[in-house]
Amino acid sequence: MPADPTSETAYAKINLALHVRGRRTDGYHDLETLFAFVDAGDTLTAVEAEHFSLTVTGPFAAALAGETDNLVLRAARLMAKYNGITTGLAFTLDKHLPIASGIGGGSADAAAALRLATRIWGPHRVTWRASDFDAELGADVPACGLSRTCFGSGVGDRVVDFAIDGLAGAPVLLVNPQVACPTGPVFRRWDGIDQGPLDPVHWLDARNDLEAPAIALVPVIGDVLNALRQTGARVTRMSGSGATCFALFDYAVGRDRAARQIMADHPEWWTLCGNLR
């Protein structure tokens, strides 16, 4: 039980690797990916209320202004529907993760809402678990529900735990050029060539098949990757469909030095220092 039972962290997601295996007839893509999570993200709080409501604060609140179908409310309403609950929750989302950035911000928020609702309503009212229906909210929501290292297949919605020795606690730096990179157009630019399966044991030798199409759509992603590759990081890749990129370091001092340099060189870019969970 967290220290504050009415608060949840919506942990930032990264894709340590992402292999696209083929286009499906329904317009989606079969893929294989290795998810990991940073120990920071958005903060969601909630209290019981007669109806559902959402207040958004934080540095990226303006990006969600006027949104009438936020994933937080969709998630809570879906849980209420499955469990026959007729009351609501009043949510406050402190939004610190950029929008459309490849780090699962909306999906993480939805997963946090499901965890909060489960805890606030209690086991006597919640008999349908979030894992029974969370994929209805989006492909990344099941992984964000776990918020720990896991292997994803299908469209990313079929997840199984996959622990990697020595990964927990690894210093990580996330950088986003503050340019939205919508998922759909990136997938449509994928060249359609299956480059082979993802072996999660050898993820260091894997890749993100969406890097090239994302850079073609948003060229500044290439600048972010080049900047990160000059930091001496152990691994640098784009996460998801972009535009956020990440670098893993052996020591926090290297991560912090890299963050200071990138913030000095590119003050317009968003950065986040953290550790993998």
Image (tube, rainbow, N blue to C red):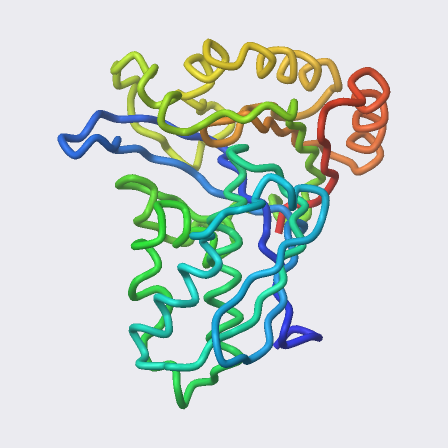
Q: Is 180 situated above or below 72?
A: above
Left or right of 7? Residue 79 is left
Q: Is 122 situated above or below 189?
A: below
Q: Name the spot of residue 73 as percent of width and height, x first.
A: 46, 61
Left or right of 29? Residue 126 is right
* Quadrant hosting residue 32: top left
Q: Nearer the viewer, residue 199 or 208?
A: 208
Q: Residue furthest front?
A: 66
Q: Give the residue at x 26% y 31%.
A: 29
Q: Is 37 situated above or below 82?
A: above
Q: Give the residue at x 46% y 9%.
A: 216
Q: Give the residue at x 31% y 81%.
A: 84
Q: Give the residue at x 44% y 24%.
A: 206
Left or right of 251? Residue 174 is left
Q: Name the spot of residue 113 as percent of width and height, x first.
A: 50, 64
Q: Name the spot of residue 197 as percent of width and height, x first.
A: 30, 28
Query: How many numbered markers are drawn?
Result: 0
